[in-house]
Amino acid sequence: MPRLLPFQIMVAVLVLVFVGALVGSNRGLILSDRPMIAHIAEIKPPRDFDLSEVLDDYGVHLVDPPGNVERYMLGRRTGDALAKDPGKTSAPAAGRSIKEMVFLCMPFGWFADLGDVIYVRNDVETVYGQLNARGLDAVTRANGGDVFQRGFFPFWAHSWGWLWVAGLALTIWLWLRAQAKRREEEGLI
């Protein structure tokens, strides 16, 4: 039985990660992509014009989907989120508009959607938009440089599902190795 211990540990870890992703995530089970904003850097809003007002008037309003617990176990729909109090709006920040590729509630990659954007968030939605030349110039002056070049894109947050796949491959290899040892001990090989 000790030869199966590494295999059993890996199975437990894979199940825990999957259940954690299922319960703690708002990603879908089926293969899909979903729009989102990857945070790049905090910014100081320019004094020339109100970014929040510009974003609210002309930005894309991306409603945050309910988590899987809310969606599957409590039966809430995305539209139900609009009925609740949005809470306090965050300060404007620089981000990158992407589409995240999702399967089994885990992210497996991303691709660019609108590119560099300025966004604000509240408890219900993310509002984002690209800046025109005048707006980008005002943000650059207020922050002392290009805000989109400051931060680091958090690629690991959008591709960690591959670690689960690697763990699955390791688990299969551990199973095959344990079975080969068992056959060798029993004289079947």
Image: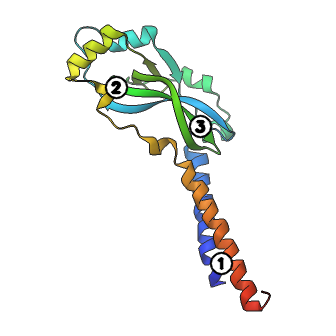
Asked whether residue 160 appears in the rendered view, the answer is: yes
- Residue at 45 percent across and 9 percent down: it is 58
Q: CA distance from mark 1 to mark 3?
A: 34 Å
Q: Mark 1 packing: few (<14 Cα in 10 Å), some, or many (20+)?
A: some
Question: Tag 2's secondary structure?
Answer: strand
Q: Earlier in the sequence, mark 2 or mark 1?
A: 1
Amino acid type, mark 2: Ala
Tell me the residue that label 2 is attached to. Answer: 93
Q: Quadrant of the C terminus?
A: bottom right
Residue placed most toward the observer, 182 or 51: 182
Q: Is residue 99 above or below residue 107?
A: above
Q: CA distance from mark 2 to mark 1?
A: 50 Å
* Quadrant in the rendering for residue 188: bottom right
Q: Is residue 102 above or below residue 84?
A: below
Q: Is residue 122 above or below residue 156?
A: above
> Is 9 on the left-hand or right-hand side of 178?
left
Tell me the residue that label 3 is attached to. Answer: 101
Tell me the residue that label 1 is attached to. Answer: 4
